[in-house]
Each structure stands twice: as structure tokens, then as C-alpha cells.
Image: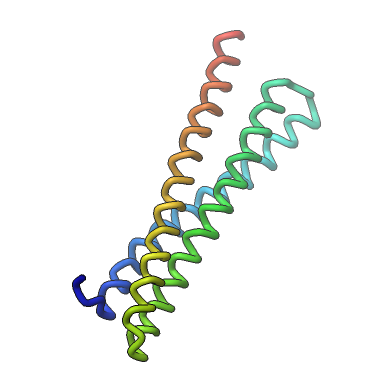
Amino acid sequence: MEELNLATPALLFSAISLIMLAYTNRFLSYAQLIRTLKEQYMKQHSDVTAAQISNLRKRLYLTRSMQITGISSLLLCVVSMFLIYVGMHLLSIYVFGMALLLLIISLGLSVWEIHISVQALDIHLKDMENS
């Protein structure tokens, strides 16, 4: 196995930071959309609006999970770098491997969230077709 050095976990910093920025933007967009849909629903109870709110709730929880696993991945990258610094190379390899697994999980959750987003748009399009 090739030696893990300080630069390897550091490479993920920029990628994880950009991913976290995208996740945060999604979260803020969902929060605003939920507020808007809630106001619409309070004025006029609609099955479509209720379905959209339900869909957004799922997406919001998925986004939270994406953020948690992404942040955990970044944290383990830092821990891995610290372990390399103090000379615990074998442990740093395992910790870095866990960081990679968490990043994979975060990206997988993102794919799942995109799938649910398409369903939300489908609800909206079906409502448009019925009108």
C-alpha cells in the first residue's frame, strides 16, 4: 500500500467544501419554498400543495443527512491528517478510509434526494396537466 501523506486528505478539503456549499444552498432553498407553500396551503387547502410539502419534508431530512455525513467526512480528514502528523500512519489510513466512506454515503444521499426532487416536479407537472 502506498504511503498516505498529509496532502492526500487535504485534497478532499476543496471538494467537500464545495459540496457543503451546494448542500447548504439546497437547504436554504427548501426552507424558503416550505414557507411559501405553507402560506399557500393555509389560504387554500390543496392536495397538490400538501403533496409538495410532504415531498419537501423528505428532501429536507435527506439534505440534513447529506450535510451531517459530509461534515463528518471533513472532520475525519482532519483527524487523519493529525494522525499522520503524530506518526500514527496505520490508524490514519483507517480513519481516512472512513472519511471516504462517509463522503460516498453523502453523495449517495444526494442522488436519492435528486430522485425525490424529480418526483416533486412530476407532481407539479401532473397538476398543470389536470388544470
- The residue shown at (55%, 60%) is 68
Report x, y in % for residue 74: 43, 68
Residue at left offset 78%, top offset 24%: 44
From what the image shows, is residue 15 above or below residue 26?
below
Looking at the image, how many numbered discs can be counted on the residues? 0
Left or right of 121 in this view: 90 = left
Determine the residue positioned at 56% across, 28% down. 120
Looking at the image, which is closer to me, 21 or 82? Answer: 82
Residue 38 position (above or below residue 47):
below
> Which is more toward the observer, 84 or 113?
84
Quadrant where the C terminus lies?
top right
How are the colours assigned in the image? rainbow
Q: Position of residue 23 (x, y in %)?
A: 49, 53
Residue visible at 43% across and 46% down?
A: 108
**Residue 87 appears in which quarter of the rendering?**
bottom left
Q: Is residue 43 left or right of residue 116?
A: right
Q: Residue furthest left?
A: 2
| Residue 121 vertical position relative to residue 88 in the rendered view, above or below | above
Where does residue 48 sit, x and y in percent of width and height?
67, 22
Describe residue 14's horizontal placement relative to residue 106 as left or right. left
Q: Is residue 110 above or below residue 100?
A: above
Q: Residue furthest bottom?
A: 86
Q: Nearer the viewer, residue 5 or 118?
A: 5
Q: Which image quarter holds the N terminus?
A: bottom left
Displayed quadrant of residue 20:
bottom left
